[in-house]
Amino acid sequence: MSVAIALRNVSAVYRLGDKPVTLLDRANLELLPGRYAVVAPTAADQTAMMDLFCGRRQPIGGRLHMNGECSYPIGRLAAFALPVTGIAVVRHLAALYDLDYRETRDFVEDLLMGDREHMSKAMRHWPVDARRRFGMIAGILRPCDIYLIDGALPQSPGDETFMRRWTPLFAARCENATMLMATRQLHIARAIAQGVLYVANGQARLCDLSHLRLPEAIQLDGGDAVEQEPDSLDQEFI
Amino acid sequence: MPSSRKNIHENLVHARSRLLAGELAEAREIARRMLGGANDVSVRAFLDSTDRRAVAEWSKARAAGEPEAMLAAAETLLAFGLFEDRWLRPLAQAAIKGEPTPEIVEALRQRSLETPLPHEETIELIQLVESAAGRKAALLYALDAIPMAAAPTDIVERAIELALALVEEASSPAAAAVQDGDEDEPGVSAEAIADAAHARLDALADVEGERLAAAIGAPTEGDTADEAETFAAERQRAAGEAKASDDLEGALRRLALEIAILRQTPQPTPTFESSLGAFAVMVPEPRGREFEGGEPTAVPTLPELPTPPRPRGNRGFVRQCMKLGSLWALNMKAETANEPLGWIWWVLEPILQIVMITFAVILLGLPLVNGMQIMPFAIIGVVTWLSTRQAIMVSLVQGGTLISQMDFPQVRAAHLQLARALRPLAIYLFVGICVIAVAFELDRSPFPDDPLHLLAAICSAWLIGLGVGSVLGSISLRWRSVRRLVGPLMRVTGLSSGLFFLPEQLPPNVSELLLWNPLMHAILIGRSAFFVQYDSPDANWTYLIIWLIGSLLVGMVCFMNDERKRGRMRR
């Protein structure tokens, strides 16, 4: 089975205010196709890790190899808070994804249902829920090999109608694709993820689902990331 | 075995050497023997450490996702008796991907009957058992796994395949005779054997079905528990008979019973939720669902997912251009807020800039400068300078309103910089052409002599601005105060670039100094291309191109370095 994502000696930093924070320090890892939850000590680490995967942040050393096309991080809203109309953004997305504009617009409007009335208004003035739904539709417009989820998925009862139509389409897109989710909705991550990509102390490791938890709840030393390795034998017998 | 302290030490050293050589089982055996003879604390510690080491090896192999390492670690854990049921699924997955030993397959077979595996992995495991222990063992495993499976149809189908293959194997001498071409010999073809086996299995299933129906009796509501008990009892009976006979016939009867049970059990119709699999959790509970008694809701009608066109030839360049164009349009719409006043100001602002600077030149009171009409003379200088200046300012602050578009993996920082820098070039060229057209109509300007040459000069200056802006942006990341210097620096550069004068009008030592400014060359080349009567003696294309290539190269290096080293966009 081919590797979906490979980190080879990857080093990455990000800035928290003016302070540089080391995210990865010569990390090596190979991820096989599957569904993973991204867990890190802080939410900033999680976001920075997703930035690395979607290409917004570049590693300062080493090589991050993504085998195939990667999606927009579903759940992020900033890209849709522009003072331009929904129609203009759909036109932009169609050009970006190399899709037919008419087909793309029909698809978006069909899924938006009640929200389609906002299409001719500036997206900055859309209700947040409508913008979130638009962002989720944008994430499945183009078939990708790697899907990213960063942020909360709509889970209020009012979102049921939209989610009932969006989820099967997303599931269809995710078939044979790799999925990385940095979400705080643990019940969703627990049901969907097959493993945990744990990022701490400059290293990225694969763990089982027992390590799935909210960023704040994780010990900063990351001591319980993997089952404890034995001390060196020499120390044991001295 | 009596062991002195010396013997313990020698054994310990030997065991440790085995341990370090990776032969854990041998090391552990030595330690066990030692434990039988002596109750030394260090030997217990040794054993504890081997246990921990084995578990750690397994964890490490799992974390790395290496099937072969996982299988090796699991073998040690199984040998030590440390393997836990919660690791069964990862082990099954590793076994499917790697090459498991017969011991691992056997362990998986046994344990999966106590802790059932998901349906897909059970099917794969049947395949593994077949390759490790033969077809009959695989059939027996499948028969054992069927009662525990939530959706046994696939496993029953796999068992039928195995059973038919076994029947064909058993009848192979007869079929072989036909295949050898011995037409005179009375024989049976392989197809005929398969058909006969099918028919036989069908008949057996009918018999078992009748027996089941008789055992259950007339079905009434609430009989589910009784039905399950009857199935369990029948399974037990069939398994007992098969064990006693220990032949293929017994296995076939067990399979027939499972087919009959499957026929008897109504198959659940797939609900919308079940069709989503693990993703069903994403769908929130609908409003008022609790009052509806949890009835499955209707499957929604879904739109067809858009499909990208098939790649035709080399579409890379076209796609990049489309992407740039789209970002450029989005940037324009975002900067004008897509409102009428925004658009009016978008055009009005450069017109005012150009007109103001042009009139400043006209106010000097010169109708002609070296035979060139003052209006186009000034406009060429202003358009070149303003588009270069804006390219520098835009490159200094890369992301702007479009920074959030970096979330799209298709968009890189370079796209944003280019798209944003294209805006001033396009707008100043557009406004410049409009003003010159008006001047031409008013007989205040000639028709340009060499428009392409003029365009090349303006674009060269703009590209130099792009490169210089990237360099200045990179410097400003290290020393922020540099940004404050850029404004005054731009004004000095503008004033010294020949907007209002020609180098020929200045003293030779001053003009020599000002000719170091590449913008001066671009403007002079532009004027030479526009006016037939003017050919600048100082304009130098070579100098301009050297600046162009140099600034773009250094700018690109700075840009790439910033992207990697800083790991962020300049805002």
Image (spheres, coloured by chain):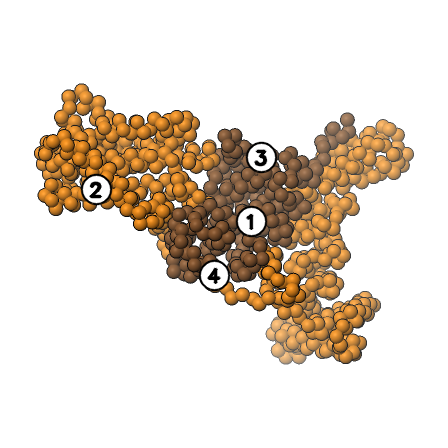
Chain colours: A brown, B orange
Report in which chain the residue with disc 3 lies.
A
Residue position marked by numbered label 3 in the rendering: A202
Q: Which amino acid does label 2 sit on?
A: Gly
Q: What residue type is labelled 3?
A: Gly
Pair 2/4: label in front: 4
Q: B401 and B355: which one is in front? A: B355
Asked if the residues shown at circle 2 and circle 3 are in contact, with their CB atoms under 8 angstroms apart, the answer is no
Report, in whole angstroms, how far the alpha carbon at label 4 lies from the one at label 3. Answer: 44 Å
Same chain, labels 2 and 4? no
User: Is residue B202 visible from the viewing direction of this image?
Assistant: yes
Residue position marked by numbered label 2 in the rendering: B432
Vertical position of residue B258 compared to residue A91: above or below? below
The residue located at (14%, 34%) in the rendering is B362
Residue position marked by numbered label 1 in the rendering: A152
| Residue sticking out furthest to the front | B341
Mark 1 vs 4, N-terminal side: 4
Pair 2/3: label in front: 2
| Residue sticking out furthest to the right | B2
The residue located at (76%, 36%) in the rendering is B49
Report in which chain the residue with disc 2 lies.
B
Report, in whole angstroms, how far the alpha carbon at label 2 lies from the one at label 3. Answer: 54 Å
* Disc 1 element: loop
Q: What residue type is labelled 4?
A: Met
Report in which chain the residue with disc 1 lies.
A
Report, in whole angstroms, how far the alpha carbon at label 2 lies from the one at label 1. Answer: 49 Å
Same chain, labels 1 and 3? yes
* Disc 3 element: loop
Task: Give the percent coordinates (x, y) of residue B29.
Answer: 80, 40
Report in which chain the residue with disc 4 lies.
A
On screen, residue A182 versus residue B177, left or right, reads left
Residue position marked by numbered label 4 in the rendering: A113
Report, in whole angstroms, how far the alpha carbon at label 2 lies from the one at label 4. Answer: 46 Å
